[in-house]
Image: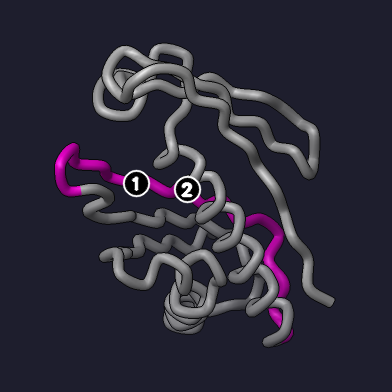
Amino acid sequence: MATTRTATTQWKGPLIGGAGTVSLDTSGVGQYEVSWPSRAEAANGKTSPEELIAAAHSSCYSMALSHGLAGAGTPPETVQTQANVTFQPGEGITGITLSVKARVPGLTDEAFQAAAQDAKANCPVSKALAGVNITLEAELLA
């Protein structure tokens, strides 16, 4: 069954000097301030589209890796993924680095690296961002 998730942004003013709020409508978990300086300079307590993409990508990737590992008979104890989304004004998103650390009892590093790469290729957010250079750093914890 397909699901639809909704977020809404209310923006006031021009790009430079304007500001807005983005609300996570489906979950209702919050409303967050956004501005051009929070996107192109320092965050200063506000979010940006790139931070929201990083949140989506890190959570999607963690779920995909966990699912793949469990499906192979080696469910993880923990999966921690950090997504770093690089934004260059005038160019856009120029790259994403996923850094994952996982504890998976009984799994070799070689098998973990293969599962990590498979999750990167098949995570729905990775697929949606197919035009962006996505790199992966994967560490199997003892």
- Is 85 included in the stretch rendered in magenta? yes
Q: Which mark is residue 142?
A: none
- Is 88 included in the stretch rendered in magenta? yes
Q: Which mark is residue 53?
A: 2
Q: Quadrant of the C terminus?
A: bottom right
Magenta stretch in the rendered image: 73-91
Q: Secondary structure at mark 2?
A: helix
Residue 22: horizontal and vertical position, in percent?
A: 58, 30
- At label 1, the amino acid type is Val
| Residue at numbered disc 1 | 85
Spot the residue most to the left. Answer: 90
State whether residue 98 is above or below residue 87. below
Front position in the image: 58 or 37 = 37
Q: Secondary structure at mark 1?
A: strand
Front position in the image: 40 or 134 = 40
State whether residue 110 is above or below residue 30. below
- At label 2, the amino acid type is Ile
Spot the residue most to the right. Answer: 1
Q: CA distance from mark 1 to mark 2?
A: 7 Å
